[in-house]
């Protein structure tokens, strides 16, 4: 074909085989089309055909003669999309393509014109157009996705945005909302609620604030109640789940809170009934949270001998465990069947060892247990509580049972462990008292008290026994009034200050330690002195330390007026070499989800450096907190309140503001 005949093709619409089309070297677009864009074009062409022709110019050889091949000046993306369809065997490589030949315009200029002088439709128009396809033509997300070459998830997102209140969509069009804010509103399709929340918003709110206000009456799927019941059981009961298509919602939000609470209560009740039937307690109660103000005495299991049958079973299981251990002690990795058997044996050993501790049948017959929901969504059982009306009659507990002490224990919310039965050996002394006047008895016992003080002040070992006895009598026995040393433990319920603290590893360790001492105590307080006195030195000091530690209170409250006490707490922490990294970790629940984004970034910056903090800067708060938890897990980072140096500086400053240390004064 001559140059003249090529020029005569200008403006002509022709069908050209795909194999005769190639990319123009003068195309203004140098950055390649993305794979996603080509996929979308291919899907669109497959569903609707070539809605727009290509613009081409003939290729000519060195002498100006046409070669039969055409350069694609406008529409390179559509050419690549058709080649993708050839690769997928949807069309043949010689598929005729509708083209307009342009030999009059500069090919580079019109290529640039195609990409510059056009305006992309407003996103809101796109959202509503997708919604129209679904509503008017009945197309599902999967079908729409196939027709436009996007994922079904993207289609669902656009459909959800198209369902936002028209009033808010118009605000978005007018620039009154940004896309991230509109996405936050799309978490629900309730237009009235969306508009009501918009009216409550502060100036220029972030998306997280909008999302929080829209879900404030819902329960997150990560909530302990939802984890306990299970999303499947909740849905089967008719509950609905709100899902956020634009963030990682970790399961969504449960809308029917009343139904969820009903399911939780019912399942906890079933757990309580099963426990009562299996173990024989007089009563069991189900509670969402442990009722710290229960006002009941608590009993603990005591050591018992295993039956001959259980002893033989334990010995057999332990022998097999030891044999397997010896056989595989050099193995780097255990076979699956051996590993599983180890697990079975460990479970059997734990079950048999647990039988070495048992509650008194009489305590089980009159006592009960609480079934509560842990903060991780698991069930926790606390056994051995005796209601006041189920206590032994007063005649059995001794004539000196102190009702006031019982009331004080009840108000404190602490758990007396054992019966406060007084020593009947005092009866002989009481007979002698009856022959003397009250005034003389007071006179003589005052002199005896002075003698006790003098002698005790010279015998610190006995003083430790007396103090330990006094503390243990009040901590482990209810209403005993058995202590002669005038020292009273003041106990602070930490669960009132830190939600879920009893569920932490440290809280469980403390509970186990307390229960271990309670199991060793004599049932009757009359035998407590001998118990303490007969302990070896290390054990006695360990019990003393345990009782004293229960009275420690370093909790800082708003408007706290105990600066010197907090300073003493700092010195105590130094003395015991307190390292809070052993007891506390920065998690979303414990810290990172309860501070601002700036606080999260500061923690990461201190724990890992500026570079790590910068990587999180653009994240949303929920995602940032999750990422920070993982990053800080192995760093040992602590907030300033838990660091020794910070505590030192804080308490010293508080002491200075109080005008220095108080002067010591003599006391009677």
Image (cartoon, rainbow, N blue to C red):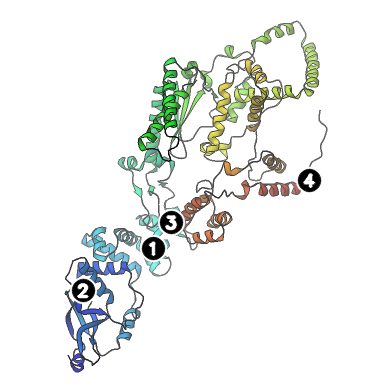
Residue pictured at 63% horizontal, 30% vertical: 546
Q: Nearer the viewer, mark 4 or mark 2?
A: 2
Q: Earlier in the sequence, mark 2 or mark 3?
A: 2
Find disc 3 in the rendering and name its residue.
Answer: 197
Q: Position of residue 634 (x, y in %)?
A: 53, 49
Q: Earlier in the sequence, mark 3 or mark 1?
A: 1
In the current view of this chain or complex, which residue is farthest to the bottom? Answer: 4
Label 1, label 4: how many angstroms apart (C-alpha)? 61 Å
**Residue 590 can be seen in this image:** yes
Q: Position of residue 304 (x, y in %)?
A: 50, 18
Q: Earlier in the sequence, mark 4 or mark 2?
A: 2
**Residue 351 can be seen in this image:** no
Q: Earlier in the sequence, mark 1 or mark 4?
A: 1
Which of the pair 70/443 is nearer the observer? 70
Label 2, label 3: how many angstroms apart (C-alpha)? 45 Å
Contact flag, marks 4 and 3 (Cβ < 8 Å): no
């Amino acid at each position: 074909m001559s140059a003249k005949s090529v020029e005569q093709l200008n403006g002509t619409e022709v069908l050209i085989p795909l194999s005769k089309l190639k990319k123009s070297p003068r195309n203004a677009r140098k950055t390649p089309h993305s794979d996603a864009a080509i996929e979308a074009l291919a899907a669109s062409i497959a569903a609707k055909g070539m809605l727009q022709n290509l613009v081409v110019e003939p290729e000519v050889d060195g002498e100006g003669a046409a070669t039969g091949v055409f350069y694609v000046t406008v529409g390179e993306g559509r050419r690549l999309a058709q080649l993708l369809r050839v690769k997928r065997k949807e069309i043949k490589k010689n598929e005729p393509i509708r083209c307009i030949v342009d030999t009059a315009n500069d090919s580079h200029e019109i290529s640039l014109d195609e990409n510059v002088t056009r305006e992309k439709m407003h996103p809101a128009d796109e959202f509503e157009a997708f919604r129209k396809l679904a509503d008017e033509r009945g197309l599902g997300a999967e079908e729409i996705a196939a027709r436009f070459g996007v994922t079904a998830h993207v289609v669902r997102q656009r459909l959800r945005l198209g369902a936002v209140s028209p009033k808010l969509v118009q605000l978005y069009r007018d620039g009154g909302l940004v896309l991230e804010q509109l996405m936050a509103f799309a978490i629900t399709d309730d237009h009235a609620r969306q508009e009501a929340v918009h009216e409550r918003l502060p100036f220029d709110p972030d998306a997280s604030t909008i999302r929080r206000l829209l879900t404030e009456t819902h329960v997150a799927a990560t909530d302990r109640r939802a984890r306990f019941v299970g999303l499947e059981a909740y849905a089967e009961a008719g509950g609905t789940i709100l899902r956020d298509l634009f963030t990682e919602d970790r399961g969504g939000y449960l809308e029917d809170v009343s139904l969820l609470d009903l399911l939780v209560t019912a399942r906890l009740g079933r757990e309580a009934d099963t426990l009562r039937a299996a173990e024989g307690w007089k009563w069991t109660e189900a509670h969402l949270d442990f009722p710290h103000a229960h006002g009941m005495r608590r009993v603990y299991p005591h050591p018992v001998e295993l039956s001959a049958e259980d002893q033989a079973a334990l010995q057999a299981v332990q022998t097999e465990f030891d044999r397997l251990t010896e056989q595989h002690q050099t193995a780097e990795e255990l076979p699956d069947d051996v590993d599983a058997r180890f697990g079975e044996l460990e479970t059997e050993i734990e079950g048999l060892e647990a039988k070495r501790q048992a509650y008194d049948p009489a305590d089980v017959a009159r006592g009960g247990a609480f079934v509560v929901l842990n903060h991780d969504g698991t069930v926790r059982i606390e056994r051995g509580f005796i209601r006041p009306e189920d206590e032994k009659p007063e005649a059995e507990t001794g004539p000196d049972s102190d009702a006031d002490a019982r009331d004080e224990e009840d108000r404190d919310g602490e758990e007396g462990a054992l019966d406060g039965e007084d020593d009947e050996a005092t009866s002989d002394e009481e007979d002698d008292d009856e022959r003397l006047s009250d005034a003389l008895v007071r006179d003589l016992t005052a002199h005896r008290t002075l003698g006790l003080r003098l002698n005790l002040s010279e015998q610190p070992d006995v003083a430790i026994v007396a103090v330990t006895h006094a503390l243990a009598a009040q901590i482990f026995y209810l209403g005993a009034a058995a202590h002669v040393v005038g020292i009273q433990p003041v106990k602070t319920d930490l669960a009132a200050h830190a939600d879920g603290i009893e569920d932490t590893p440290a809280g469980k360790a403390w509970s186990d330690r307390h229960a271990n001492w309670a199991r060793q105590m004599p049932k009757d307080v009359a035998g407590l002195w001998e118990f303490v006195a007969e302990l070896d030195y290390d054990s006695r000091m360990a019990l003393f330390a345990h009782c004293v530690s229960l009275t420690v209170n370093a909790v800082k409250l708003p408007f706290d007026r105990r600066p010197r006490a907090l300073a003493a707490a700092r010195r105590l922490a130094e003395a015991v070499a307190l390292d809070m990294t052993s007891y506390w970790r920065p998690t979303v629940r414990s810290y990172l989800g309860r501070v601002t984004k700036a606080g999260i970034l500061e923690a990461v910056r201190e724990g890992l450096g500026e570079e790590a903090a910068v990587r999180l800067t653009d994240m949303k708060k929920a995602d940032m907190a999750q990422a920070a938890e993982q990053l800080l897990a192995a760093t040992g980072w602590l907030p300033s309140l838990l660091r020794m140096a910070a505590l030192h500086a804080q308490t010293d400053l508080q002491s200075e503001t109080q005008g220095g240390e108080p002067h010591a004064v003599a006391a009677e």
